[in-house]
Amino acid sequence: MSRVITGTRKTMTQKPVAKTRPVKRTSANDAARKVTAQSGRPNVVAPRSLTVFMAQAWEMEIEAAQRYSDLADALETHNNPEVAAMFRTMANYESKHADEIRATMGWSESPPLTQRNTAWPNYEAPETTPVDDVHYLMQPWHALQLALAAERRAERFFAELVRVATVDAVRNAARELQAEEKEHVALVREWMKKVPKPSRDWALDPDPPRYTD
Amino acid sequence: MNDVVATSAPTPASYKSSYKPIWCPGCGDFSVLSALTKALAKVAVPPERVAVVSGIGCSSRIPAYTTCYGFHGIHGRALPAATGLKVARPDLTVIVTGGDGDGYSIGGNHFLHACRRNVDMTYIVMDNHVYGMTKGQPSPTTEPDWDSKLSPGGTGVRSFHPLVIALASGANFVARAFAGDPNGTAEIIAQAIRHPGFAFVEVLSPCVTFRPEQREWKQLAHPAPVSETDDPARAARRIMTDDGFNIGVLYAGSRRPYPARVGAAKKSPADLEAEFAL
């Protein structure tokens, strides 16, 4: 049985939060800590056919695109146009990938839900950036860091599918998509070289939205 | 059948309006909005057959972000407004949304009686254990030892237990979801919409601004180790003894919903007036 693809991910936003306010232990959290975190999450399950696999890959791209689009909206609303534009660009890339999958499979419309409903190894599709990994003062470098993490998760996901696939067509397609994700990882790394690293006090807000600290 | 066939069924995007949410970046409510639109796509009820009713608070802004009919009402009064709507228009799918302050404090009494009446609607509470919109006051579900400048040393007041209250008051469906799992939340909301009677879904939705430590919920939330039950006594025991992070449907009962009489609204205003004439 394959192991869940995970990896400890230090969220960018934990830094500024920790600077202004230490994480507090509350009674509810303490009680719940006794329970194994995310117990019962499914392992990577090999799709039974190429069609199902591609429908899942399509869903993965669509979900990533939707999330980037939502994040772009949020950052735009909070007057961070630079990062919003970057998320918008990423949303477009992911949408294009989804369109490519659809074109490859000759689907004129979205594949039906019954073909997708994937049991992802974590709560969301591997390429989806978690909604809480953003900060209103984040900078383009942070956005690229999130994109890099997402592409790496996608690459690991397909690598795992290559390992567990029982159908040749699925294994071959997974290998192809893994190679594509690897390319994306390299592209994001190159992109990051062109973007300045944020200063240490990037999250410092002289007029913060909360006053309770 | 493995082949993919084209479909023109509604997609989550069909339920999303063009208004951009003004929630803080990172807020769990983004995921709940996403889950709600996914759930509506799953049950495939067209947007014009759905009404989303809310009170006041960050989460209560949701109706504007959907393409469904919306009613952004007054603080704590979403449930009575929604009850009236459902009774008058039983053909509509009625979804009520709000936060823990709106639903359990200001609207606490309405919550009890909505559960008791068991009108066929779905109540989604985005619980972040804090009043976010008004800048971080403790809410009914805030832990007694949560220390902040507005509650030094914590309130020392026992937290409200919404799921137990809902069950004891007669809700026909009780579930807990986690915003960090929008797909799982969508499944639960879809099940709640399909379930007859008053369906209560508490969604743990982190407030990254006033309760940043709630980012940790991602590590704490876990699927409920037992399947749903229709036995309220068993459900009560489970809910009373769980850790507050069990995710899933915890109770699905079979109590008959309040009879929203089809045709009752056919009376003319004059007929209604005559009934009240002295």
Image (cartoon, coloured by chain):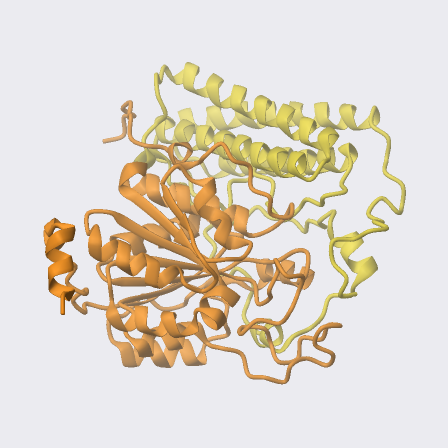
Chain colours: A yellow, B orange
- The quarter of the picture where the C terminus of chain A appears is bottom right
> Which residue lies most toward the front here?
B278
Q: Estimate the x, y position of residue B97 in percent, counting from the top left.
A: 42, 55
Residue at 34% over, 39% down: B41
Query: Where's residue B242, x and y in %?
Result: 46, 76
Q: Which one is nearer the viewer's eye here, B261 or A141?
A: B261
Q: Nearer the viewer, residue A107 or B182?
A: B182
**Residue appearing at x 54%, y 30% in the figure:** A65
In the image, residue B147 sits, relative to residue A23, either above or below, namely below
In the displayed structure image, the side of residue A114 where residue A40 appears, left or right: right
Q: Is residue B210 left or right of residue A55?
A: right
Residue at the location (88% across, 47% down)? A201
Task: Answer with left or right where residue B172 lies relative to residue A184.
Answer: left
**Where is residue B192 shown, x and y percent of the image?**
31, 56
Using the image, determine if residue B128 lies above or below residue A190: below
Identify whether B57 is placed above or below B11: below
